Image: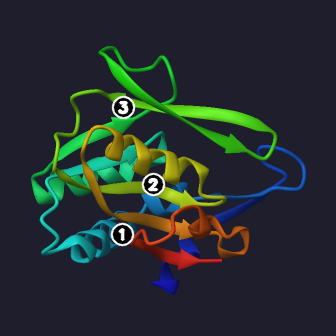
Amino acid sequence: MDDLKQYIRDIPDFPKKGIVFKDITPMLGDGGAFGKVIDAFAERIDGKGVTKVVGIESRGFIFGSALAHKLELGFVPVRKPGKLPYQTVRESYELEYGTDAIEMHRDAVGAGEKVVLVDDLLAAGGTLAACANLVKSVGGDAVCSLLVIELGFLNGRQRLPGHDIHALITY
């Protein structure tokens, strides 16, 4: 999957000074590269009995909905607070400076249902861990997480011990 790196653009000092943002829009703009990501994700969950794809706001929506469509599975959006219209469950998590939260519709995942979590990037792991906890809070089972990019030097996996995490590209 290292050939996909050519479709990731580094943007220095975005969104703030000192951060090198990994821009995936060139990957999205190339049908072959985008399709390769979705195909690789589909292969990773083959045989796991997944019934829904959970996409994390916002770029997880792009990859997650394409994967759900390919596999004819339901799609569940996980969003920042106040963005979903129905009853929600919320999970807060720690940031480097403060806290944040994500929400999911209370009825989006059924008890015992197996889901896959999808996002574009794993950094410190707070959002992904919070998403796994959301699914668990309603009785679901997050069988694995699929990511395009992992920033390995930030040790995000440590926030999800024992969780099955697959990243296509690791920096």
Residue plotted at (48% across, 63% down): 27
Relative vertical location of residue 89 with respect to residue 21 in this rendering, above or below: above
Q: Is disc 1 surrounded by few (<14), some (14 to 19) or many (20+) residues within 10 Å?
A: many
In the picture, measured across the screen, residue 103 lies left or right of residue 65, that is right
Q: Position of residue 88 (x, y in %)?
A: 36, 22
In the picture, measured across the screen, residue 74 lies left or right of residue 54, that is left
Quadrant location, the C terminus: bottom right
Quadrant location, the N terminus: bottom left
Residue plotted at (30% across, 69% down): 41
**Pointer 3 or 1: first along the chain:** 1
**Pointer 1 or 2: first along the chain:** 1
Instruction: Give the residue type at disc 2.
Output: Asp
Q: Is disc 3 surrounded by few (<14), some (14 to 19) or many (20+) residues within 10 Å?
A: many
Residue wearing tag 2: 119
- In-front residue for pair 9/38: 38
Element class at badge 2: strand
Instruction: Give the residue type at disc 1.
Output: Val
| Displayed quadrant of residue 71 | bottom left
Residue wearing tag 3: 104
In whole angstroms, how far apart are the C-alphas of marks 2 and 3? 15 Å
